[in-house]
Amino acid sequence: MKLQKFYYKCKNCGNTYEQSQLAAYGEFLMRNPKGDAVYLNSFNDPVFDEVEKLFNEKKKSMLNLSLDDEITMFQEIFSVACDKDPDGNPYRIDQKPMCPHCKKVEIGSWGAMEKYVDEEINPVTHVQWNTLTMKQKELLISEAVDQYLSGKNEKRAEMRVQQKKNTGGSMMGK
């Protein structure tokens, strides 16, 4: 598989490192926290379609969901339908690369390089997902959406607290 190299600069330690990426519509490199990848072609993966259908049913009960939020949420929750790595870590569509120096995932800057490599990437698997009943799958997707939304609300609350600290207690900045 032909992949493009991207550079990343760690915000934490300043280290610059490279990681291969796939730049094709509907195709993803799902990564675990260590950076190991599996390949997902959303056009040829029946589980992707199944999760999308379950997600669309769940999102009918959610109000005021922007398209960006919807895409981000779907990409985050899709990993519940994928088998984990040998250490039990999930592969995620949106997993940012970890700095090999400080082991943090804090990207200060990044960009595409004019450098391409051929790498063999195994496809994502869904063995565990395929053993579940439809009811279990619906519940798993529902729980993943609820967990995503509660995490997003926690992040918003943290941002409000930080903003309040930065503005001397006033949310209006006065």
Image (spheres, helix red, strand yellow):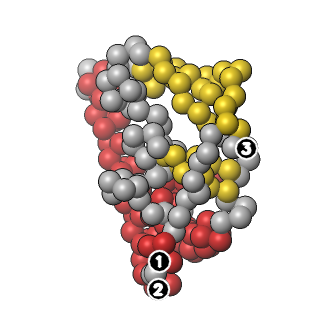
Spatial CA distance of label 2 from label 3 is: 32 Å
Which numbered dot is residue 137? 1
What's the amino acid at mark 3?
Ala
**Quarter that holds the N terminus:** top right
SS at mark 1? helix
The residue at 41%/32% (across/down) is 98
The residue at 32%/54% (across/down) is 87
Dot 2: few (<14), some (14–19), or many (≥20) neighbours within 10 Å?
few
Q: Is residue 137 above or below residue 102?
A: below
Say whether residue 16 is left or right of residue 54: left
Q: Nearer the viewer, residue 153 or 138?
A: 138
SS at mark 3? loop
**Residue 114 visible at all:** yes
The residue at 46%/81% (across/down) is 131
Dot 3: few (<14), some (14–19), or many (≥20) neighbours within 10 Å?
few
What's the amino acid at mark 2?
Thr
> Dot 3 corresponds to which residue?
24
Q: Are marks 1 and 2 in contact (CB under 8 Å)?
A: yes
Comes first in the chain, label 2 or label 3? 3
- Residue 48 in the image: state x and y as whole percent: 61, 66
- Residue 28 in the image: state x and y as whole percent: 62, 48
Can you tell which of label 1 and label 3 is closer to the viewer? 3
Q: Are marks 2 and 3 in contact (CB under 8 Å)?
A: no
> Dot 2 corresponds to which residue?
133
Q: Is residue 158 above or below residue 135?
A: above
Which numbered dot is residue 108? none
- Residue 115 in the image: state x and y as whole percent: 68, 23
Kindly indicate the quadrant of the structure image that contains residue 14.
Answer: top left
